[in-house]
Amino acid sequence: MDMEFPDLNDLLDAEYFRHASAESVFSHLSRLPPPESYGCDNVQPRTLGVLTSRPEPLIRLGLARYCSNRETIASMLSEASATIRCAALSNRNIKHGDITVRKQIPYAIYEQILNSGEPAEILALLSNPSVSHKLLGKVVGRKIPVQPMEDQRWWALMRCVGSNPGLRHTISGSHHEVAAHVDPIRALWGLLWDAERCSTAEDCLREIYRFIHFIMPVSKGPQDMLDVLASRWTDPIHSASPDDPFENLRRTCARRYAETLSSDDARAAALQLHPDRAIRLGYYEGIRLAPGFDLTTACQRDDDACLSALAGNPTLHLRNNHALRAAAFRSAAASNFSRAAMHQIALRLAKEDPKKYGDYPDRRREPRGSLR
């Protein structure tokens, strides 16, 4: 008969944790390395059995917060203590809402939390960077909770999603990291032209703009999306205001789309010639400028606003592109607002070559006197 040898470390650890203080156990659990992959346990079976049999609240909290065993976390989600449930929902070693955990943690639990859970539970779930991107996509797309949801509740959920560090990281992340959150990205783009699920009320616009401006990574979208934006997200009451929130939304969306293109791309021409000024300015801010970019023609159409937008474009290299720099100064000199336009160019040069142009004052107001 073959002898079965136990895991010696597991055996000794289990005996130690049977007698260790709750503070020592919590300290140990908080230092556990993440599992090699989702689904692997970071606590050995015998040790886990000992810890789950202990009733101390601090040990329960440590298991809920750091243990990667799905059955253990499922039992924590049914606890009466809201603190324990929040700890389990914020556990980064569990891919909450993913199809791989549904055998141990039914999807209905997450729907119930989003429908009627405590605010702290909802925040713990939606701000967890390990939560399933498909679940986040359903929240953003207003497909979950399953019950009819008022705008105020949806905005609150959107703010929770917006605090998710996993989504924020995709701003500068690799294509793989962006792809990992493709569902909420697509859901948000879809809301922009879905009248049934998203009104154009200013409060709703504010939440969407916050989400796109701070979280949305570069994303390719359908070309006609910008035409829909130009027609749907326009408000004649605000159109004369320099801080028109509707124009800011259209401009930011156009910038995000333009970031995927180069100025010599055929699709970019539709942005530069678009009848909506906000979309054109977004194009100037986000486009990857090719060497043959025609700055003079662009400035003739949009005057100093074009130069102001281009000043924030990271691919505008005036220092090494003599032709572009000369065109910028010519366009600024011909501008109706030449002092402000020259100021923008000088600030950009000072940023690109601080040794040569760094003594130019970086002021929030335009400098006194004419720069012509």
Image (tube, rainbow, N blue to C red):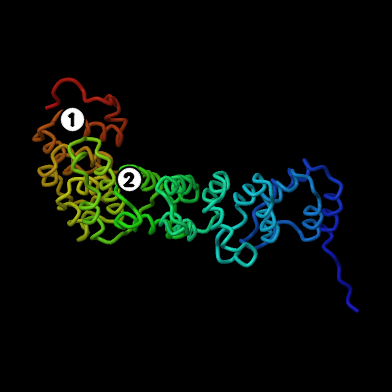
**How far, Cα to Cα, is label 2 from label 1?**
30 Å
Q: Quadrant of the C terminus?
A: top left
- Residue positioned most to the bottom: 1
User: Between residues 357 and 298, which one lies in front from this camera angle?
Assistant: 298
Q: Secondary structure at mark 1?
A: helix
Count of marks placed on residues: 2
The quadrant of the picture occupied by the N terminus is: bottom right
Residue type for callout 2: Leu
What residue is rendered at 23% in x and 41% in y?
A: 309
Element at badge 2? helix
- Corner quadrant of residue 14: bottom right
Which residue is most to the right?
Answer: 1
The picture places residue 22, in percent across and down from the top left corner, at: 79, 43
Q: Which residue is mark 1?
A: 340
Q: From what the image shows, is residue 272 above or below residue 206? A: below
Q: Is residue 141 left or right of residue 335?
A: right
94 left or right of 3 in image: left
Position of 305 with respect to 45 (left or right) is left
Q: Residue 362 at what x, y percent from top left? A: 29, 26
Q: Closest to the observer: 29 or 358?
A: 29
Image: 145 above or below 3 = above
Residue 128 disc label = none
Which of the two discs, 2 and 1, labels the residue nearer the N terminus? 2
Looking at the rendering, which quadrant does residue 75 occupy? bottom right
Tell me where residue 177 appears, x and y as whole percent.
Answer: 46, 56
Q: Nearer the viewer, residue 205 or 273?
A: 205
Question: Which residue is tagged 2?
Answer: 205
Percent coordinates x, y for residue 79 in the rendering: 69, 51
- Mark 1 neighbour class, 10 Å CA radius: few under 14, some 14 to 19, many 20 or more: many
Amino acid on which the number 1 mark rests in the picture: Ala
